[in-house]
Image (cartoon, rainbow, N blue to C red):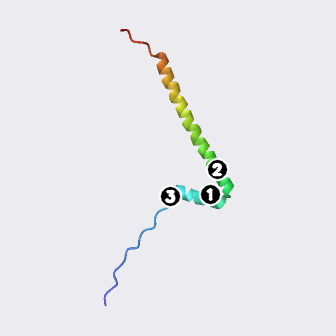
């Protein structure tokens, strides 16, 4: 009597942390609250981007203001 060959079962994909958090968020929050939270986070990211742009502009302007013309 021969044993049936073992078949490998495909591994299930591991859930990501982001996916798990969104699943918990979906269970705990209503649609409007979820949208509000995402909009707030988008605003935070946009504020950070603007702050970075402002810092870079200040750096360039200060560098241009302190640069002295070269003698020819």
Image coords of residue 52 (percent x, y): 53, 33
For residue 5, above or below residue 34: below
Q: Which residue is mark 1?
A: 25
Q: CA distance from mark 3 to mark 2?
A: 20 Å
For residue 69, above or below residue 59: above
Query: Which residue is painted at 53% across and 55% down in the image?
Result: 18
Query: Which residue is painted at 58% across and 40% down in the image?
Result: 46
For residue 22, above or below residue 64: below
Query: Which residue is painted at 37% across and 74% down in the image?
Result: 8
Q: Is disc 1 placed on a helix, strand or loop?
A: helix
Q: Which residue is mark 3?
A: 16
Outermost residue to the top: 72
Q: Is disc 2 placed on a helix, strand or loop?
A: helix
Please identify, in this view, whether the residue under mark 1 or under mark 2 is nearer the observer: 2
Label 1 environment density (alpha carbons within 10 Å; few <14, some 14–19, many ≥20): some
Residue 71 is drawn in which quadrant?
Answer: top left
- The disc at residue 37 is 2
Looking at the picture, tell me which residue is in the foreground, 28 or 47.
47
Outermost residue to the front: 72
Q: Between disc 1 and disc 2, whose residue precedes? A: 1
Outermost residue to the left: 2
Tell whether label 2 touches label 1 (CB within 8 Å): yes
Image coords of residue 17 (percent x, y): 52, 56
For residue 6, above or below residue 61: below
Q: CA distance from mark 1 to mark 3?
A: 14 Å
Residue 19 is drawn in which quadrant?
Answer: bottom right
């Amino acid at each position: 009597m021969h044993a049936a060959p073992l078949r490998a079962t495909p591994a299930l994909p591991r859930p990501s942390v982001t996916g798990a958090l969104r699943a918990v968020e979906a269970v705990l929050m209503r649609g409007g609250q979820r949208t509000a939270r995402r909009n707030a986070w988008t605003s935070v990211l946009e504020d950070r981007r603007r702050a970075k742009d402002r810092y870079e502009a200040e750096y360039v302007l200060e560098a241009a203001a302190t640069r002295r013309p070269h003698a020819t």
